[in-house]
């Protein structure tokens, strides 16, 4: 998915919300799906990983080629040494 397609899909989701045809949760799911698709296609051999554990990184999603690389990318976003895990998103 290229950037223009991703933006159009997000705009479509927002328009559905504004028209009352989609709930906030539906829009969040659609936008998250667009972002994940765009991000995983942006990096060859990459996958999306979500951090769980330490509140400072809870829910952070990164694209990386491995679980170890994902942990490094998440850890770079915060000060200190947070305790957390990462799970691959499908």
Image: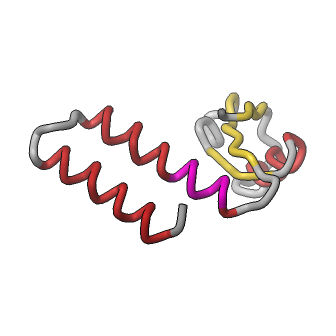
Q: Does 8 appear above or below 71?
A: below
Residue 39 among magenta residues = yes
When asked about the image quadrant of residue 51, the answer is: top right
Residue at x-position 49% and y-position 43%: 33
Q: Colour mode? A: secondary structure
Residue 79 among magenta residues = no
When asked about the image quadrant of residue 10, the answer is: bottom left
Extreme residue in the bottom direction: 4
Residue at x-position 43% and y-position 64%: 5
If the image is split into quadrants, where does the N terminus sit? bottom right
Instruction: Determine whether, in the image, residue 62 is placed left or right of residue 11.
Output: right
Residue at x-position 78% and y-position 60%: 44
Instruction: Determine whether, in the image, residue 25 is placed left or right of residue 66.
Output: left
Instruction: Determine whether, in the image, residue 26 is placed left or right of residue 17.
Output: right
When asked about the image quadrant of residue 79, the answer is: bottom right
Q: Does 2 appear above or below 80?
A: below
Span of residues in magenta:
35-41
Tally the numbered discs: 0
Where residue 72 sits in the image (x, y, percent)? 84, 51
Extreme residue in the right direction: 68
Where residue 69 sits in the image (x, y, percent)? 86, 50
Q: Main secondary structure of the magenta part?
A: helix
Question: Which residue is at the front of the view, 11 or 85?
Answer: 11
Residue at x-position 19% and y-position 53%: 15
If the image is split into quadrants, where does the C terminus sit? top right
Q: Does 67 appear above or below 41?
A: above
Question: Which residue is at the front of the view, 79 or 74?
Answer: 74
Question: Which residue is at the front of the view, 67 or 56?
Answer: 67
Where residue 32 sits in the image (x, y, percent)? 47, 44
């Amino acid at each position: 998915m290229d950037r223009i397609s991703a933006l159009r899909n997000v705009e479509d989701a927002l328009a559905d919300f504004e028209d009352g045809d989609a709930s906030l949760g539906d829009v969040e799911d659609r936008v998250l799906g667009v972002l994940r698709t765009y991000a995983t296609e942006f990096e060859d051999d990459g996958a999306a990983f979500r951090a769980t554990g330490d509140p400072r990184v809870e829910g952070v999603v990164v694209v990386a080629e491995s679980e170890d690389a994902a942990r490094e990318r998440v850890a770079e976003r915060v000060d200190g040494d947070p305790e957390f895990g990462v799970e691959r998103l499908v």
